[in-house]
C-alpha cells in the first residue's frame, strides 16, 4: 500500500465504524480490495486479505487504523485455514467469514481451534437455518443485513442468539430511523453510514453558542486572514486558547521551555497549520448532537481532500480543499440544509458549488473521498479520474489522513 509497489498490486483499504446505540464507536471493519486480478490460482480476495494483514497493518499499525479499538477483518476460508488470523493477538481483531461459506470439517475445526485460543469470529450476512449455523458455537458476533430482513425476524434472531452470548450487529443501516428499529429489535451494535445522513432537511435555528463556533469557522477560513487577526481570534475564545497552548506544549513538538503566549504559539505552528487545527476544533464545538464519529469522518475527509487538491493544483489550493472536506458534513452537524449552512460561510465559489452537489473538479474530489471511505472502490476510481487524479494516490492519501487525524487527537484532544 505504501510507496514502491506496482500500481497493479495496489490494495485499497478503508474502514467503516461499528457503533453502539449511543453513537460511540465499538470498532472498525477494515474494507479492502486488491486492484490486481487473481494470479496463479489465488483469488484476489486472498491477496488483498494477506496484504492487509502484513503490509498495511504492520506498516501503519492497528492503533492508527482503529484508534486502539477492535478491527474487523474479512478473511477468506483459504486464509483462515492457513492460520493467517494468528498473525495478530486475540484481543486485536475480529475475523469475519461470509455466511454462505462452504462448511466442511476443516473449516469447523479451524474455527473451533481459534475460538479455543481466544480469537473472536463473526459471521457476516447471517441467515437462519443456513449451513453457517454449524459455526454458531464458535462465533462471538453475527451480522444481519437489516435491509433484507423484517424487524420481527431480526427481533426473533436476537431473542435466540443473545442468550448464547452472541452479539448481533445490524448491518447496512443507512438511516437514523433504521438504526432506531434495529436497536428496538435488540441489536446492540450497528454498522452503516446512517450517522452521515441529515436527520432533517429543515432543521431548527442554530443556538447562539454553536452560531459563535460557525462564525469562528468562517473567520478562520477568510482568505484575508493574517497572523495578527488569527492571534486575536484565538485570544477571544478561552477554549481555543487552551487547546492551542496545550497542543504546542505537547511532547510531539519537543518544545524546550513551556509556551505561554498565543503569539509565540501561532508563530511556532504557522498560519496554515493552526488555521486547519483551529477549524477542526471549531467544528468540534459545533457538534452539539449526533455521534462523535461525524467529527472523525469530517477530519479524514478534510485531510484527504487537501492532499488530493495539492496533487492536482499545488500546495496553494490545499487549504480550500481541506475546508471542502471539513464542511461536507455541516448539514448533518447543524441539522440544516447545506444551502442554508454555506450561506453563512465565506467560501470560494468552486467549493460552495461542490458542497451543494454541482459538478466540478472539487465535487469530483469530494465524491472520490466519500466513495473511498465507504469501500465503493469503482466509484472512487471513476471520481478521481474525473478530477484528473491518479486513482493509485487514494490508498496513500487515506493512510496519511488516518495518521494525521490520529496525531491531531493525541496532541490536541480534538474529539
Image (tube, rainbow, N blue to C red):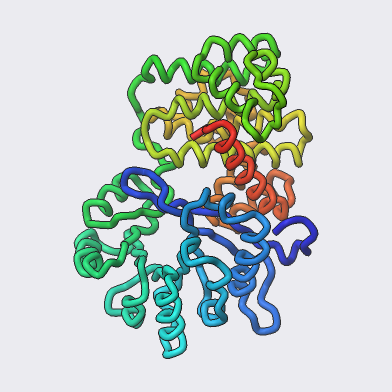
Residue 352 position (above or below residue 113) = above
Q: Is residue 369 left or right of residue 102?
A: right
Q: Residue at x 44, y 70 (%)?
A: 119
Q: Is residue 337 left or right of residue 396?
A: left
Q: Nearer the viewer, residue 103 or 354?
A: 103
Q: Residue at x 61, y 55 (%)?
A: 61
Residue 101 position (above or below residue 152) = below
Q: Is residue 55 left or right of residue 154?
A: right
Corner quadrant of residue 375: bottom right
Residue 47 position (above or below residue 362) = below
Corner quadrant of residue 1: bottom right
Q: Nearer the viewer, residue 298 or 149?
A: 298
Return the x and y of residue 162 as percentages of the image width and height: 24, 65
Return the x and y of residue 203 as percentages of the image width and height: 35, 27
Q: Residue at x 38, y 30 (%)?
A: 335
Residue 44 position (above or below residue 394) = below
Q: Is residue 230 visible?
A: no
How many numbered marks does the figure carry? 0
Corner quadrant of residue 351: top right
Q: Is residue 322 visible?
A: yes
Return the x and y of residue 125 as percentages of the image width and height: 38, 68
Q: Residue at x 42, y 71 (%)?
A: 118
Amino acid at each position: 500500500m505504501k510507496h514502491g509497489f506496482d500500481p497493479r498490486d495496489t490494495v485499497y483499504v478503508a474502514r467503516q465504524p461499528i457503533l453502539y446505540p449511543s453513537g460511540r464507536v465499538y470498532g472498525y471493519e477494515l474494507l479492502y480490495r486488491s486492484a490486481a486480478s487473481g494470479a496463479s490460482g489465488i483469488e484476489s480476495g486472498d491477496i488483498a486479505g494477506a496484504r492487509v494483514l502484513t503490509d498495511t497493518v504492520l506498516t501503519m499499525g492497528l492503533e492508527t487504523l482503529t484508534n486502539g479499538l477492535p478491527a474487523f477483518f474479512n478473511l477468506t476460508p483459504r486464509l483462515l485455514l492457513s492460520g493467517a488470523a494468528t498473525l495478530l493477538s486475540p484481543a486485536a481483531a475480529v475475523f469475519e467469514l461470509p455466511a454462505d461459506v462452504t462448511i466442511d470439517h476443516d473449516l469447523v475445526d479451524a474455527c473451533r481451534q481459534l475460538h479455543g485460543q481466544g480469537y473472536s469470529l463473526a459471521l457476516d450476512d447471517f441467515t437462519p437455518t443456513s449451513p453457517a449455523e454449524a459455526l454458531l458455537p464458535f462465533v462471538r458476533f453475527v451480522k444481519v443485513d437489516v435491509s433484507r430482513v423484517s424487524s420481527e425476524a431480526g427481533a426473533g434472531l436476537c431473542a435466540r442468539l443473545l442468550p448464547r452470548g452472541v452479539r448481533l450487529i445490524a448491518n447496512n443501516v443507512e438511516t437514523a430511523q433504521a438504526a432506531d428499529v434495529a436497536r428496538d429489535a435488540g441489536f446492540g451494535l450497528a454498522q452503516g453510514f446512517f450517522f452521515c445522513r441529515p436527520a432533517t432537511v429543515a432543521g431548527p435555528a442554530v443556538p447562539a453558542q454553536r452560531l459563535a463556533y460557525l462564525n469562528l469557522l468562517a473567520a478562520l477560513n477568510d482568505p484575508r486572514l493574517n497572523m495578527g487577526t488569527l492571534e486575536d481570534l484565538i485570544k477571544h475564545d478561552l477554549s481555543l486558547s487552551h487547546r492551542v497552548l496545550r497542543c504546542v506544549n505537547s511532547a510531539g513538538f519537543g518544545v524546550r521551555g513551556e509556551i505561554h503566549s498565543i503569539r509565540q504559539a501561532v508563530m511556532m505552528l504557522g498560519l496554515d497549520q493552526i488555521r486547519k487545527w483551529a477549524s477542526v476544533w471549531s467544528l468540534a464545538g459545533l457538534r452539539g448532537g449526533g455521534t462523535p464519529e461525524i467529527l472523525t469522518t469530517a477530519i479524514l475527509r478534510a485531510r484527504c481532500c487537501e492532499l488530493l487538491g495539492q496533487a492536482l493544483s499545488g500546495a496553494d489550493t490545499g487549504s480550500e480543499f481541506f475546508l471542502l472536506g471539513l464542511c461536507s458534513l455541516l448539514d448533518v452537524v447543524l441539522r440544516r440544509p447545506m444551502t442554508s449552512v454555506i450561506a453563512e460561510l465565506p467560501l470560494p465559489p468552486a467549493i460552495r458549488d461542490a458542497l451543494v452537489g454541482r459538478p466540478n473538479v472539487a465535487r469530483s474530489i469530494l465524491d472520490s473521498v466519500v466513495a473511498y471511505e465507504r469501500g465503493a472502490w469503482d466509484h472512487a476510481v471513476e471520481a478521481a479520474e474525473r478530477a484528473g487524479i491518479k486513482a493509485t494516490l487514494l490508498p496513500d492519501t487515506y493512510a496519511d489522513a488516518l495518521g494525521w487525524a490520529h496525531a491531531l487527537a493525541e496532541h490536541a484532544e480534538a474529539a
